[in-house]
Amino acid sequence: MTAARWFKMYALGYLVFLYAPILLLPIFAFNDGTIIAFPLQGFTTKWFSQMFGNATLALAVKNSLIIAVSSAVLATCLGVFAARAATRYTFPGKGGIIGLIMLPLVLPEIIVAVSLLGVLLGLGVSLGIWTVILGHVLICTPYAIAILNSAFQSLDRSLEEAAYDLGESRLSTFRLIILPLVAPGIVSSLLISFTISLDEFIIAFFLAGTEPTLPVYIFSQFRFPQAVPAIMALGTILVLLSIMLLAIAEYFRRRGIAKSGGKDTGGFL
């Protein structure tokens, strides 16, 4: 057997191992039995009805949406400033500063969460939604910078220089020329940051206090076997939502590259 054939078999096995559990979610979400096992008991949609009628789940979804939207907006705003500075200007300690900003990408989230918890409790800050937002902004900002770096690097600097020659200020050039060109990257950053924040569990578990969030709620429900099918139904909806958001983000990323005339070096999909 050739090396290429072995590689194809390995890739196929890896994809099956990775995605088979996700494919099982909708199967058990529509299964009439409360036991997550084969054989299936029959088709039903009652778990979706049970999910939508859960008040605690509704509160968790509301909190998670507030956190995800706030984190995405703040992380993207910080990412725009950082990416602009990293791609346009040279200043002392630039490499070290950017490296520190990107450090949460490689740090274990449990370390970040425990560190933030210690600092916040030491400062006397009450745990709640805003402390989770703070932690998620810290996690999401490096991803936003990575996306926006590509958008800013693909800009044609001659357009900016032409705007200066025509009498535009730096602020008006940034608002009228640069931001429209990197808008697809900004949208992509917002969507990716939103998805990361919505799915994040560890920081929310440590920093949410008494405020339930969606991942923490899902984790708590696995202690009750009768609640698992409804969680499968919820997981099915979350998977579809995540795929949709990632597809939209990838569309805007590619659109931004095509709009600026840059070269696609690979993306999310």
Image (tube, grey):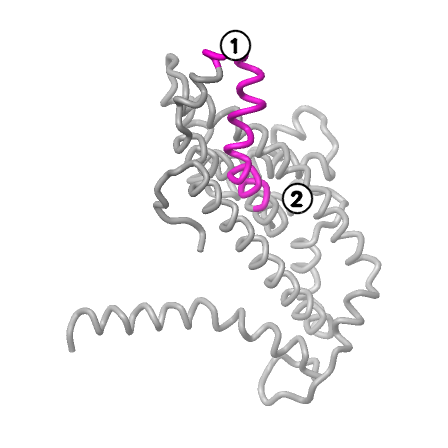
Q: Which residue is mark 2?
A: 68
Q: Quadrant of residue 124?
A: top right
Q: Quadrant of the C terminus?
A: bottom left
* Residue occupying the point 45% across, 11% down: 165
58 falls in the magenta region: no
Residue 52 is situated, as x and y percent measured from the top left of the image, at: 80, 65
* Residue occupying the point 39% across, 38% down: 261
40 left or right of 16 in image: right
* Foreground residue among 13 and 260: 260
168 falls in the magenta region: yes
Secondary structure type for disc 1: loop
Residue 13 is situated, as x and y percent measured from the top left of the image, at: 35, 72
Q: Which residue is mark 1?
A: 167
Secondary structure type for disc 2: helix
Q: Quadrant of residue 130?
A: top right
Residue 91 is situated, as x and y percent measured from the top left of the image, at: 39, 13
Q: Quadrant of residue 44?
A: bottom right
In the image, residue 57 above or below residue 132: below
Q: Amino acid at mark 1?
A: Gly
Q: Main secondary structure of the magenta part?
A: helix
Q: As drawn, which residue projects farthest toward the left? A: 2
Q: Give the extent of the magenta segment.
A: 164-191
